[in-house]
Image (cartoon, helix red, strand yellow):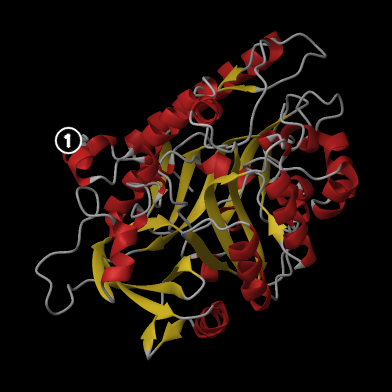
Amino acid sequence: MAITDPASTAAEARYTSLVERVRAQYAAIPAGDPVRLRKKTSNLFRTRTAVDAPGLDVAAFDGVISVDPENQTADVLGMTTYEHLVDATLPHGLMPLVVPQLKTITLGGAVTGLGIESSSFREGLPHESVLEMDVLTGSGEIITVTSSTEDPNRDLYLAFPNSYGSLGYALRLRIELMPIKKYVQVRHLRFDSADEMATAIATITAAESFGGSKVDFLDGTVFTADEQYLTLGTWTDELPQGYREPSEYTGMKIYYRSIQERANDVLSARDYIWRWDTDWFWCSRTFGAQNRLIRRFWPKDKLRSDVYWRIIAKARRFDISRKQSRLLRRPLREDVVQDIEVPVDRLAEFLDFFHREVGISPVWVCPLRSRDGHTRWPLYDMDPSLTYVNVGFWSTVAVDAGIDPTSGTVNRKIEEEVTRLQGHKSLYSSAFYPQDEFDQLYGGAEYRRIKKRYDPQNRLTALFAKVVQRR
């Protein structure tokens, strides 16, 4: 694409300068020493051991180089947050095909990890809309990989998703965008059983419509075993009858509570995209932010997920949960913060198990399908002919006396059930798989082949060590 816009030309020049800077940083790390990113923030929920070694400072790789409205694409720096990316694309009437729920998730992070949202039943996961990437590999090379089947580095392109920086870091990505309208009209459909909900998911996903109306977005909320909702979103440029303005959930009103309170709603495009961020789904209740008195005085611009994350980080640093439990003589609690996927026809089985053995509520559900119906991604291999459903749950569970809450007793039980149901588990949080099982589930043989090709000296921490051994 020829770039003629002066701002884009300046952004390209800035990108070239940033690349030279990161090359110099890499060269300054002594040969044989590990290479890592130096970041102040993260959306990962697994424990990470502090490392004193110098890292690559990539904080400046946050920004959109260009947006091409005609071809509906954007060139984006790898550390660009989705908040900044959406801010750059919405004025053009466009948005990324999949926008993960939290504003500070980065594009590079969602691609090397996994992201999902309510458009995933049509558009798959964020990496499926990547046309090309510049990847800094463990060997220090910067390689441009593309979606083309003729690309000699296609193996890196396909293995990059779910590699979590163990094969390289995305410095620049070109992604597809999709057109938007002013509003998203939503319908909340209640189901009394998981079986009924799963059947509806399969039907709506196949038809991309419901009741004669197009469905552009689909996700759901499970409150109890006999109260669950699917939320269907449809683009519209007109406010529905009875609305003078769209609903707004960035102040006193709380989005997830509205699901139980009203069957129909409408949000602006921006507010729909970030509907979950204000209260971090429902997790803001942990901090008192849903108490009306506290919320009234809580600054509106601080009702956002990264603020809650900083509170959690400090609580973890000082081990507040364990100290509080001991002081109050309550059972210790295990963190159970996970997203898993199971085939839609196994969803009811998983939810039955989850209600019985774990008991966290609410939980989020989000259908997903392969975007093109044939591409396989070896480090997170799902059958492209099937519809899967993501189940997200983020809380703590009391453990029996004498059990170390960091040993992962509950998490391991969940892992075993997901495997039994032929599902998968995202790796942004703690994992407890043995090495052989991990290799079987996450493409171990192919991973080692690609690791040897692009990081022969093992400068980047290997995937198993990073996500299971928590280094």
Q: Nearer the viewer, residue 238 or 302?
A: 302
**SS of the residue under disc 1:** helix
The outermost residue toward the left is: 244
Residue under the point 28% across and 64% down: 258
Locate residue 384, reporting x and y percent: 70, 70
Please indicate, yes or no, whether residue 127 appears anywhere in the rendered image. yes
Locate residue 84, reporting x and y percent: 37, 40
Locate residue 348, reporting x and y percent: 62, 75
Residue under the point 31% across and 52% down: 90
Horizontal side of 238 relative to 40 (left or right) equals left
Q: Nearer the viewer, residue 206 or 66?
A: 206
Q: Nearer the viewer, residue 18 or 42?
A: 42
Count of number-bearing discs: 1
Examine the rendered structure and indicate whether residue 100 appears above or below residue 370. above
Please indicate, yes or no, whether residue 165 appears anywhere in the rendered image. no
Residue under the point 48% across and 26% down: 315
Q: Quadrant of residue 333?
A: top right
The outermost residue toward the front is: 329
Locate residue 337, reporting x and y percent: 58, 46
Residue under the point 63% across and 13% down: 24
Examine the rendered structure and indicate whether residue 194 appears above or below residue 303. below
Horizontal side of 275 relative to 217 (left or right) equals left
Q: Nearer the viewer, residue 122 or 467?
A: 467
Residue highlighted by disc 1: 297
Amino acid type indicated by mark 1:
Phe
Q: Residues within 10 Å of mark 1 (few under 14, many from 20)?
A: few
Horizontal side of 231 relative to 32 (left or right) equals left
